[in-house]
Each structure stands twice: as structure tokens, then as C-alpha cells.
């Protein structure tokens, strides 16, 4: 068995469901590589691209937080949101990145919640841009 079922699920829909050879995610404590037969675990995810290998091809998917749940022959990513490269609007992501950077720079006595929201918006935009740049990898 050199594959496992990977499902990426958001509250709205199933984003991805395929047999894959490997998966790399960024958990809260760093990057985690998952191969077939990995020990079971659950860990929170950062806002970051995840990388999937399927039959020698690499696919990068934008994942915005959530959890990864690893079982013997199945891995489930429960994400707040997730986007395939073909679904990302690069111009919109670039505009969101600029807006978030401006909000972070113009911070005078804003409250911490606005600052944290701007940081998260920036992370999501950068993740989308990274994933979109690799659109040919499918």
C-alpha cells in the first residue's frame, strides 16, 4: 500500500478527495510529512500551503487553519477554508495582501483584535499567492 485517501473538507464542501502518495502540512509546531502507514494523530494547522504528491505530480493547496487528522489509511484535513490553485483569484489575493499590510503599518492605538485580524488576512493572502504561483503543478 503506497497511497492513502486524503480528504480536505471545509464547512461548505469537500475540496479534495483522492488517493495520494504523500502530504506535507504546516502544523503549529512546524512542518509534518505524512506517508502511508503514518501513526494516528490530530494536530492544529497554521494558515499555510499544503503539498500533496499524487503519482509523481505535486499539487499545492491553500489551507487556512483547521486540523489534520491522520488514521491508518486515511487523512482528513478539516479546514476553515481551502482553495485549489485553479480557484484562486491572484489579483484579489494581491489586493488583500496590500490592504492587510497597510492596516498593520498604520496601527497606532488600534485594539489587538484588529491587529490579529490583519495578520491573519495577510497570512491567507500570502498563502493564496504562493499556491496560485504554482498553478502549473496539477
Image (tube, rainbow, N blue to C red):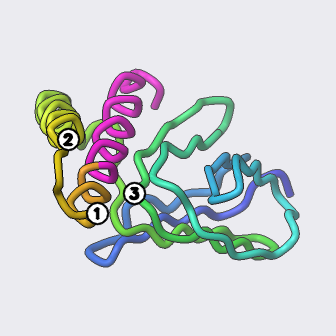
Write the residue at 77% across / 70% down.
Answer: 73
| Quadrant of the rendered image containing residue 122 | top left
| Nearer-N-terminus badge (1/2) | 2
Where is residue 78? Give x, y as percent: 48, 72
Write the residue at 30% across / 72% down.
Answer: 13
Q: Which residue is mark 2?
A: 100
How far, Cα to Cα, is label 3 from label 1? 20 Å
| Quadrant of the rendered image containing residue 75 | bottom right
Q: Which residue is mark 1?
A: 112
- Horizontal relation, residue 56 to residue 113: left or right: right
Write the residue at 49% across / 43% down.
Answer: 49
Where is residue 127? Give x, y as percent: 39, 39
Q: Pick the residue in front: 33 or 108.
A: 108
For disc 1, the neighbor class at 10 Å (few under 14, some 14 to 19, many from 20) is few
Over which residues does the magenta segment extend?
119-138
| Quadrant of the rendered image containing residue 19 | bottom right
How far, Cα to Cα, is label 1 from label 2? 14 Å
Q: Which mark is residue 64?
A: 3
Principal SS element in the magenta part? helix
Give SS at disc 2: helix
Q: In this picture, is 132 found above or below 45?
A: above
Q: Pick the residue in front: 98 or 133.
A: 98
- Horizontal relation, residue 62 to residue 25: left or right: left
Amino acid at each position: 500500500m503506497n497511497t492513502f485517501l486524503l480528504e480536505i473538507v471545509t464547512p461548505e464542501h469537500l475540496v479534495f478527495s483522492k488517493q495520494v502518495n504523500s502530504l506535507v502540512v504546516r502544523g503549529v509546531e512546524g512542518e509534518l510529512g505524512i506517508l502511508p502507514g503514518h501513526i494516528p494523530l490530530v494536530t492544529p494547522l497554521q494558515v499555510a500551503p499544503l503539498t500533496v504528491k499524487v503519482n509523481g505530480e505535486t499539487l499545492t493547496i491553500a489551507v487556512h487553519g483547521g486540523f489534520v487528522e491522520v488514521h491508518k489509511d486515511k487523512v482528513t484535513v478539516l479546514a476553515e477554508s481551502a482553495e485549489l490553485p485553479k480557484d484562486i483569484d491572484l489579483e484579489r489575493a494581491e489586493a488583500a495582501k496590500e490592504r492587510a499590510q497597510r492596516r498593520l503599518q498604520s496601527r497606532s492605538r488600534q485594539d489587538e483584535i484588529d491587529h490579529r485580524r490583519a495578520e491573519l488576512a495577510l497570512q491567507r493572502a500570502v498563502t493564496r499567492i504562493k499556491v496560485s504561483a504554482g498553478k502549473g503543478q496539477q
